[in-house]
Amino acid sequence: MITFSDDPRLPDDVTIADLRDLAERLAREAGALVRAGRPDRVEVASTKSNDVDIVTQMDADSEQLLRRMIAQERPDDAILGEEEGASAGTSGLTWVIDPIDGTVNYLYGVSSYAISVAVVAGDPDPASWTVLAGAVHSVVDDRTWTAGIGGGATLDGVPVTVNPVTDLGRALVGTGFGYDPRRRAEQGRVLAELLPRIRDVRRLGAAAIDLCLVASGELDLYYERGLNPWDLAAGSIVAHEAGAHVGGLRNGPAGEAMTVAGAPEGARALTTILEELDADSGW
Ligand code: IPD
């Protein structure tokens, strides 16, 4: 689960600004690899939870690059990556990396995919995290959002803030769906109830980018059930630092059960509807 603290405990050898810079360098470097190395026809290397939950060779290569760079620059930090899981550290910091968020878009050549890199205080167990800094690099359009706790959020170096949302009926809302068909059926039920009450919905296919689009006002709100920590960590601090409320339902933190992000009043209105719809229960 994701929380934020304005007074986090850091190792003596590093500042939030250092961590933010490193997150950005990591995300950009892996982005350059992914951009340069995309073959005309991408093959599926393996599958995970089911046949449509895929891994490509580039997911593995990008994660390898990120792990090598982190080991060189911060050898005592732990790492949690989408493809290789957790490796322990001793510093109290964990890098949470998604080597390609939006892998299905990458497979098909749809332009919304990103490298997501966050650093959190805590061990690789996502129950205990405070997010410190993060960067999301959108590969095809070469845009990078970064944030550090207390230091604001930027897109390509320019500060960003969320859109105010006073009327849910005019809000453009991003969301996404899990890979499990039973989960999707539930998500479809919730969306069918929500859709008549908002401006429209966007399903762009990369949760890290969705959260960053909220930060830069290209979406008003975002919600999704079932996010993994690597989908969520970097985008959540970018949205938080851009002025978003990032939380779960029933006063809980953002996490696997539900993530809602957006300007506080709008996020509150959306959260109320999702609670009424029991969007965080069942499959
Ligand atoms: C997925 C994407 C998608 C979201 C899924 C995620 P992946 O991540 O972020 O937008 O709806 O919940 O699992 O598999 O492309 O890294």
Image (cartoon, rainbow, N blue to C red):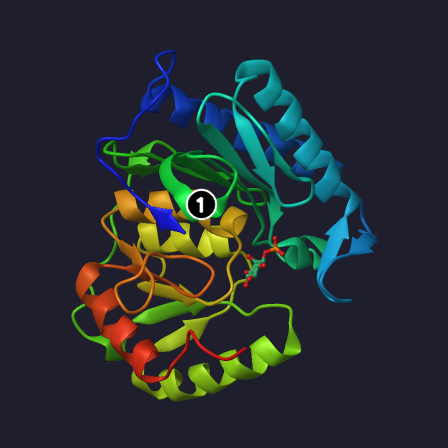
Helix, strand, or loop for circle 1?
helix
Relative side of 245 to 30, left or right = left
Residue 191: quarter of image: bottom left
Image side of residue 125 versus residue 222, left or right: right
Residue at (30, 26) in percent of width and height: 9
- State whether residue 145 is above or below residue 185: above
Q: Residue extending furthest top?
A: 13
User: In the image, 42: left or right of 221?
Assistant: right
* Above-or-below relation of 134 to 211: above
Residue under the image location 59 percent in, 45 percent down: 140
Residue 265 at x, y percent in the picture: 17, 65
Residue 36: tell me if it is visible: no
Residue 210 picture quarter: bottom left
Residue 104 x, y percent position in the rendering: 67, 59
**Mark 1 crowdedness (10 Å alpha carbons): few <14, some 14-19, many ≥20:** many
Instruction: Please tell me which residue is depicted at 66% across the width and 38% down the height of the picture.
Output: 35
Q: Is residue 167 above or below residue 29?
A: below
Total number of numbered discs in the rendering: 1
Residue 183 on image: x %, y %: 57, 76
Question: Which is more toward the observer, 105 or 92?
Answer: 92
Question: Which residue is rendered at x = 60% and y = 15% of the image?
Answer: 72
Return the residue nearer the eye: 211 or 142: 211
Please tell me which residue lies in front, 126 or 240: 126
Amino acid tagged 1: Ala
- Give the image quadrant in which the ligand numbered 1 is located: bottom right
| x and y, in percent, of residue 80 in the image | 57, 38
In the picture, the quarter occupied by the C terminus is: bottom right
Q: Is mark 1 within 8 Å of ligand 1?
A: no
Residue 265 shown left or right of residue 195 in the figure: left
The residue beneath circle 1 is 233
Residue 171 lies, with reference to residue 88, above or below; the image says below
